[in-house]
Image (tube, rainbow, N blue to C red):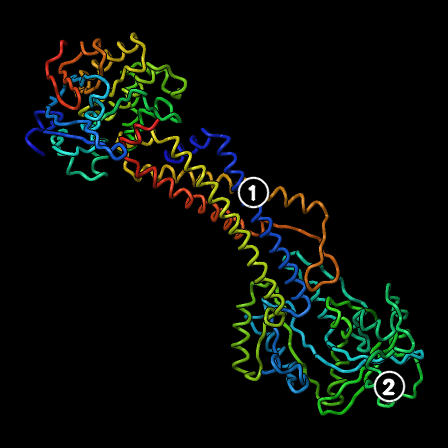
Amino acid sequence: MSSTANQFAARLTHVAKNYKVGTVDVAAIKDISLDIPHNCFAMIVGPSGSGKTTLLNLIGCIDAPSRGTVEVCGEDIGSLSDDALADFRARNIGFIFQSFNLVPVLSAYENVEYPLLMASVPAAERRERTQAVLAAVGLVEQARQRPNELSGGQKQRVAIARALVNEPKMVLADEPTANLDSETGAAIITLMRRMQSDFHTSFVFSTHDPQVMLYADEIFAIRDGLLTEHKPGDH
Amino acid sequence: MLLLKIAFRNILRNRRRSALTTSAVAVGAAAMLMFGSFITFIFEGFQTSVVQQIGHLTVFHKGYFLFGAGNATAYGIDNYKEVMSAIANDPVLQPLINVVTPTQIIAGIAGNFEGGNDAAKTFFGFGLLPRDRDRMRQWNEFGAGRVFPNDSRLSQDDETRGLVGVGLARILALCDALKIENCPSPPAATQTGGNAHRLPRRNDVLELAGREGTDKAGESGQLPRLDLLSATANGAPNVVSLYVAGTDPKDTKEFDESFVVMHLNLAQKLVYGREEPKATSIVIQLKRSEYMERARSRLAELLKARHADLEIRDFIERSPFYGQALQLFRSLFLFIAAIMGVIVLFSIINTMTINVMERTSEIGTIRAMGARRRIIRRQFLAEGSLLGAIGATAGLLLATLVTLMVNHAGLSWIPPGNVSPNPLRLDLSGNLGLVVGTWIGLTLVATLATLIPAQRAARLPVVDALRHV
C-alpha cells in the first residue's frame, strides 16, 4: 500500500486507455492524472464521448489502463489478479448505474443483501445492515417488491442502498439521474449527497447535467480524453 | 442455497423457454425409463422362463458341457445322490436353495406302433422328477413370468408317463389320441417321414422290447404308448415304453419335433438298464437370482474338496441366447440413451446460451459488485442442472403415469423361449437403479451442457458485459 492510501480515494497517473474498434485504435483516455480525495462528492463532467464512463470504469477497477497507473484506496490495481480485483471491488467499491441494473429475479431486499452474501457476512448482521440501509433510502415498505414493481426513482434508491450496504470506501455512479425525470433526479442526488455524508465515503459520478454539478465538492472536466479543468464545486 | 434460489427464479423468468427445454429432458427421461423398464421386464420374464426350466446352476461331470452331447452316458455322475445330499445339507447353500434335482438326458428313437401306426422319429429326452419339475416351474422371483400349477399329467409315482413336443406328437401320429387342435395326421404313405428307410420298424422294436405286438394298454390306462429305443451305457440297444399324457410345446420347431420329458427312473432304466443308475446333471434352482454368485462360489468349494471330477455351469452359460439377447437389448438401451442424451445436451446448450446472452448486462453488474468468475460459472451451472433435474423429475412422473396405464391395459406378450403369453407388466419401483441412473445421468448431461455457456459468461470482460444492451 502506497503513501497515498490515507490521502486519496483514487489517484490516476498519466493514464491512457485505448480501445480497438475493428482494426482502428480509439483513444478513449489520452493522458489523465488526477486525485480524488476521501469523503468527497466528486463529479466527472464532459460531453458525450469525452471519456467519462471509461474513466469511471478505470477508477472502479472494472477496466485496466493501457498506460499509466491507477491507485484506488492506496492499491495499485494493475498488480492485482482478476479474483483479487473482484475481492477488492467487493470490499471497497460500490456501483450505481444509469439503468439501475438490479437483478430482476431478486426483491429490493435481496438485491441490497446480495453484496453481503458475496462477502459471506453472517445472516444476522446481513439482515440488520440490509434493513438499515433500506430504511436510510426510504424503501422499507418496498423491500419485498421486485424491480419491475418499482418506479425509476425507487429502483435507483435500491441501487444506492446496494452500493452502500458493504460500506465501501468509494461509490461510483455513471450518470445516475439520466433515466429519471428532473424532480426524481434531484431527489436522488440529494439522497446520494446525504448518504455520502452519513456513510463517510467518496462518491464519484459522471454527469453532463449542470443542475447536478451544483452538489459537487470537486469537479473534473474532461474533453476528448484529456482533463481540461479541475475545480472545487459550488457546494 | 442462494444459487439455487436465483437459478429457480431465472428458470421461471423465461417460462416458455424453460418449459420447452424441460419437456425435451422429460421426454428423454421418460423414453429411457420406459424402454429400460420394458427391457428389464423382458429379461426378468426370460430369466424366469429359463430358470424354471434349467435352474440357476447345474453340476455336470467335467467335460460334459463341451463334449457330452456326443456321448451323454460317458459323462454320467455316478454318485449323484451323495453329491445332492452334500449340496442340500450344506449350511451355507441350504438357505439359498429352492430345488436340487437330478436330470438324465437321453437321445434315441421314439416309435408309435399302436393301433396300426408305424411312425418313428429321433428324440431328445429329459428324465426328471415330476415333483421337482412342478416346484421349479413355480419359481417367479420377479413376478414377470408365468407360474405353472402342478402338472398332474406327470406323476411322481407312475414313472411310465411322459410328455412330448407338439411337433413330435404330430410326426408320431398322436394328434387324435392326445386331442391336439390344429394338428393334422401324417398321410399314411409317409407316416414315418423321410426317415423310413433307416429308422427301426415296428417289428424290430417290439422284438427288442420282448413283446408280441399286442396293443394292450399299459399301466397308465388308455394313454397312447411310445416305444423309446436307445443305446445303454454299454452300447447295447434298449427299449422302454412311455405313456404319453400330453404335450409340452417348445419354442423352436426342431426342438419341438424331438422333445420328450419323462420320469427320471424311466430315463435311467433306458440308459443304464439294470446297472447302478447315474445322472447327467444336478440342477440347482436358487430362491433368488442374486444368490447365484455366492452359491456358485460355495458350491465350487464344496466340489473341489470332495468331488473334483465335477464342474458347475450357470444358466447364462447353458442358455447362450439369454446372454446374446441381453447384450443386444443393452446395446439398444445405450443407443437410445445416447440419442436422448444428445437431444438433452443440445436443448440445454441452446437454452443456456440464450440465457447468457440475455443476461450479459446482469453478469457485468454482478461482476462489478465483486463476484468472482467462479460465482458466475456456478450460477449458470446451477441453472442448467436445475433445468435437467426438473426435466428428469417430470420424465419420471410421466413414465410412472404411462407405466400405470400400460399395466392397467391388460396387455400380454410372449417372451423369448416361451410359447404362451405372459401379462405385460412394467415396474419402475423395482428398477431403482434405472430410475436413479436416468435421473442422475440426465441431470449430469444438463450440467455438462451448461459448462460451455457458463464458462463463456464467466469469461466476459466486465466492461463489455455492462455495455451490452
Residue at image x 35%, y 21%? A108
Identify the secondary structure beneath mark 2: loop
Pick whichever, B318 or B308, lies toward us.
Answer: B318
Identify the secondary structure beneath mark 1: helix
Please name the residue that numbered disc 2 is placed on.
Answer: B201
Earlier-in-chain disc, 1 versus 2: 1
Above or below, B207 relative to B115: below
Q: Quadrant of residue A182?
A: top left
Please name the residue that numbered disc 1 is placed on.
Answer: B27
Quick check: A104 left or right of A20?
right
Pick whichever, B118 or B147, lies toward us.
Answer: B118
Residue B139, x across and y down, in percent: 67, 63
User: Do the residues marked 1 and 2 share a common chain?
Assistant: yes
- Can I make out residue A231 in this image? yes
Residue B406, x across and y down, in percent: 67, 46
Above or below, A65 relative to B295: above
Neighbor class of circle 2 (other Cα within 10 Å; few <14, some 14-19, many 20+) is: some
Residue at image x 78%, y 73%? B257
Pick whichever, A7 or B84, lies toward us.
Answer: A7
Q: In whole angstroms, how far apart are the C-alphas of marks 1 and 2?
A: 65 Å
Residue at image x 54%, y 83%? B308
- Can I make out residue A121 in this image? no
The amino acid pointed to by label 1 is: Val
Quick check: B398 left or right of B381?
right
Residue with the most extreme front position: A23
Residue at image x 18%, y 30%? A17
Q: Quadrant of residue A123?
A: top left
The amino acid pointed to by label 2 is: Arg
For the C terminus of chain B, give its image quadrant: top left
- Name the subunit of mark 2: B
